[in-house]
Amino acid sequence: MIPFEKAPKGVPRVGVQFEIDANGILHVLARDIQTGKEQHLEIRSAIDVDDSKVTEMVESSVEHAMDDFDARRWIETKLKAEDLLKAVKQSLEDCKEDIGPDYTAEIQQAVDALNQVLARENADKNTGDVDALKQAITLLDSNTQKLAEVQMDKITEQLMNQQHQ
């Protein structure tokens, strides 16, 4: 190592260049501007990884990406299901006098089916059967169409009564 001559603080005396070659080796060239003395350093990775290990790491990252994608699909669909369950619960409370017990039981069956799919979630991986969950959402959604109409009629009636007061 060639020592550079000392200089006062704040006086630039060394120029530095960095280069990374095709093998991933960092080359550093430091040059004393006034004397022209140079020092070259070669910095190699502390981890020497062969091509087969790199391939293995890439394959592993792709595999985990698919797991992450599956978890995301499940979580997004689960959130939609939970929102639907809250809305149905509120609608049932708001319209309990306006719908019959048979229709209420039909809706409750669809709610129970949706809750069963949610209960089969793999909590460790945040995944589950997304297709079954979507089917259960569709079933509950279709079974509550009349409930939504009843609720809309009720809201419209309330608004009309408010306007006439």
Image (spheres, helix red, strand yellow):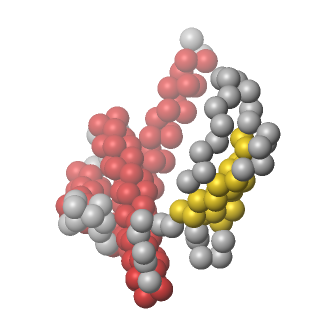
* Residue 59 shown left or right of residue 123 in the figure: right
Seen at 22% across and 61% down, the residue is 124
Seen at 58% across and 69% down, the residue is 25
Seen at 50% across and 32% down, the residue is 155
Residue nearest the viewer, comparing 95 with 34 = 34
The image shows residue 158 at horizontal and vertical percentages of 50, 26
Q: As displayed, is residue 93 above or below residue 22?
A: above
Q: As displayed, is residue 160 above or below residue 92?
A: above
Residue nearest the viewer, comparing 164 with 86 = 86
The image shows residue 157 at horizontal and vertical percentages of 52, 30
Residue nearest the viewer, comparing 136 with 122 = 122
Which quadrant does the C terminus fall into? Answer: top right
Q: Quadrant of residue 121?
A: bottom left
Residue nearest the viewer, comparing 73 with 46 = 46
The image shows residue 29 at horizontal and vertical percentages of 68, 56
Which quadrant does the N terminus fall into? Answer: bottom right
Task: Give the number of marks.
Answer: 0
Any part of residue 59 in sight: no
Q: As displayed, is residue 76 above or below residue 67?
A: above
The image shows residue 95 at horizontal and vertical percentages of 35, 39
Q: In the displayed orientation, state which residue is furthest to the bottom.
A: 52
Any part of residue 108 in sight: yes
* Residue 63 shown left or right of residue 114 in the figure: right
Q: Quadrant of residue 68?
A: bottom left
Seen at 39% across and 52% down, the residue is 79
* Residue 63 shown left or right of residue 43 in the figure: left
